[in-house]
Image: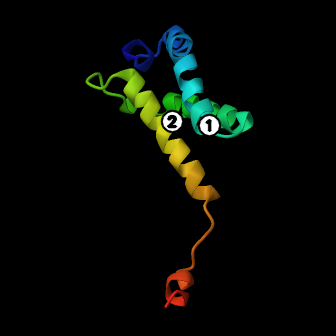
Amino acid sequence: MLAYQGGDARAFELLYQRHRGTLYRFFLRSLPRRDLADELYQDTWSRVISARERWRPDAKFTTWLLQIANNLLIDHFRRQRPEDGGDSAEEAF
């Protein structure tokens, strides 16, 4: 990751090759549909590219990558959750 931060495009290819299986399996275990897994998988790599300057060497790359993926997964589920206007709690009484 340090090499990629420094502008070495080949370093990104190596990171991708090394971690693509782990990341994709993470999404396949977490999502009911393969197309959603594909979408979030691509979004994660896009975030890695755009956030490469924020990665710090004291963080393990896999941990950082999966944290990005997990945040995207949480955002996905939040968007799927029906909006609660707050009236349902009042109606219970």
Q: Earlier in the sequence, mark 1 or mark 2?
A: 1
Question: In this figure, what is the number of numbered marks?
Answer: 2
Q: Residue type at mark 1: give it.
A: Leu
Dot 1 falls on a residue whose secondary structure is helix
Q: Quadrant of residue 39?
A: top right
Quarter holding the N terminus is top left
Q: Residue furthest left?
A: 58
Q: Residue furthest front?
A: 93
Task: Kindly indicate whether the residue at mark 2 contacts the one at mark 1 (C-beta within 8 angstroms).
Answer: yes
* Residue 69's disc number: 2
Residue at image position (51%, 36%) is: 69
Horizontal side of 70 relative to 34 (left or right) equals left
State the image coordinates of residue 7 (x, y, percent, origin top left). 46, 16
Dot 2 falls on a residue whose secondary structure is helix
**What whole-number distance in Å separates the C-alpha atoms at marks 1 and 2?**
7 Å
Q: Residue type at mark 2: give it.
A: Ala
State the image coordinates of residue 16 (x, y, percent, origin top left). 55, 16
Per the image, the residue denoted by label 1 is: 40
Up/down of 84 relative to 78, above or below = below
State the image coordinates of residue 54 (x, y, percent, origin top left). 37, 33
Front-most of residues 26 and 57: 26
Residue at image position (53%, 13%) is: 9
